[in-house]
Image (cartoon, rainbow, N blue to C red):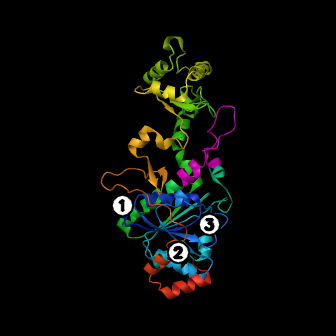
Amino acid sequence: MKAGPLSGLEVVELAGLASTAFACTVLADLGAEIVRVDRVVPGHDVISFPDDPLTRGRRSIRVDTRTPDGIDLVLELADRADVLVEGFRPGVAERMGIGPEVVHARNSRLVYGRLTGYGQDGPLAQAAGHDINYIGISGALEPIGHAGERPVVPLNLVGLFGGGGLLLAMGVLAALYERVSSGRGQVVDASMVDGSAMLTTGLHGLLNSGFWPGGRGENIADGGAPYYDTYKTADGRYVAIGAVETRFWHDLMKVLDLDPDRTPVHTDKSKWPRLREIVTEAVAKYTRDELVARAEGTDACLTPVLAPGEAPAHPHNIARGTFVDVGGVLLPAPAPRFGRTPAGTPEAVRPAGADTAAVLEELGVDAEEIERLRAAGTIA
């Protein structure tokens, strides 16, 4: 049995979107036993490549879910599971014969987690889209970027991974907690629009209170303030500065070799354009690592902007074990940390279908039937 607070939790993952894969990666990292049902022939909506870290830590079977025998195998897996996760468009699972009504009729304790872009209902429920579209209508995309410029796409972290996969995982865990008292499972309807909108709750608070008066790139936490932005260094790299409080700002002035008495007050918004010029010029005198060294031991709130490939080598990340070796590759470690039931090191990625025979044997399928299913193309 795997280590972690979710040890013993049985999950069936129907392979599909990266968002559902991430949700299951979170569960797997924390100890859940997951069987991923990969397709015999990957569909156009499944991006698959060898050693995809979003498939780490679980077993895989390849099943043709377009066939009655394939659907029967999925239902048998769901019969013994605590959770089933799917990311199809609304109605697809029902047409396949593995929707919530069918599954709950067989296993009333199962938590049925489903994730879509727009949700299970509403005018856009059946529309195609991607992360950029979902965060576009949730209000999460418009505020991101510099003043006078177009909105900046924040990778797919806000919709797909944060508002989507992470909130689906949270919803599944909440439903499991409720099941303790009710003894019953339920459907968790997660959507990237709903989730990314929820991520902007704090921003709505600032807007409603008048503490976010400007447009995009004109406020304190969106790069509008010169003391909260990124700056280019002499070697063409970048540092991140977040010296909001006065005492932190004074430390930053020392790091940049600037005289606070001859520098505009950082809280005076009318002086922000000039102050940005001063900070830009000061930062450009040093390389990134020189500035980081100067800031060490201070509260200047100056850190390097590291590329993903650099991050594992940062001393703090090394000390914390923020990245771990998974099958010879450094990947982000499970998070968060647990004091009494710590998660183990994630298991390496297994090839699609590597565990088909073993999982079917656990379901009670004999060798002759496995061979028949393989010959028919139902499994691979």
Among numbered discs 2 and 1, the one appearing first in the sequence: 1
Q: CA distance from mark 3 to mark 2?
A: 14 Å
Residue 187, position in %: x, y?
50, 66
The disc placed on residue 122 is none
Identify residue for label 2: 101
Q: CA distance from mark 1 to mark 3?
A: 35 Å
Q: Quadrant of the C terminus?
A: bottom right
- Residue at screen point 40% across, 46% down: 321
Tell me where the magenta segment starts and ends, as one range: 135-164
**Vertical comparison of 350 with 249: above or below:** below
**Vertical comparison of 114 with 232: above or below:** below
Among numbered discs 3 and 2, the one appearing first in the sequence: 3
- Residue at screen point 67% across, 65% down: 44
Report the label total: 3
Say whether residue 200 is left or right of residue 110: right
Say whether residue 63 is left or right of residue 43: left
- Residue at screen point 47% across, 84% down: 365
Element on which disc 1 rests: loop
Nearer to me, 81 or 121: 81
Residue 77, position in %: x, y?
48, 76
The answer to if 138 sits in the magenta stretch is yes
Identify residue for label 1: 3
Q: Which tag is nearer the camera, tag 2 or tag 1?
A: 1
Amino acid at the residue labelled 3? Pro
Say whether residue 82 is left or right of residue 70: left
Secondary structure mostly seen in magenta is loop
Q: Which tag is nearer the camera, tag 1 or tag 3?
A: 1
The answer to if 360 sits in the magenta stretch is no
Residue 37, position in %: x, y?
54, 70
Identify residue for label 3: 90
Q: Quadrant of the N terminus?
A: bottom left
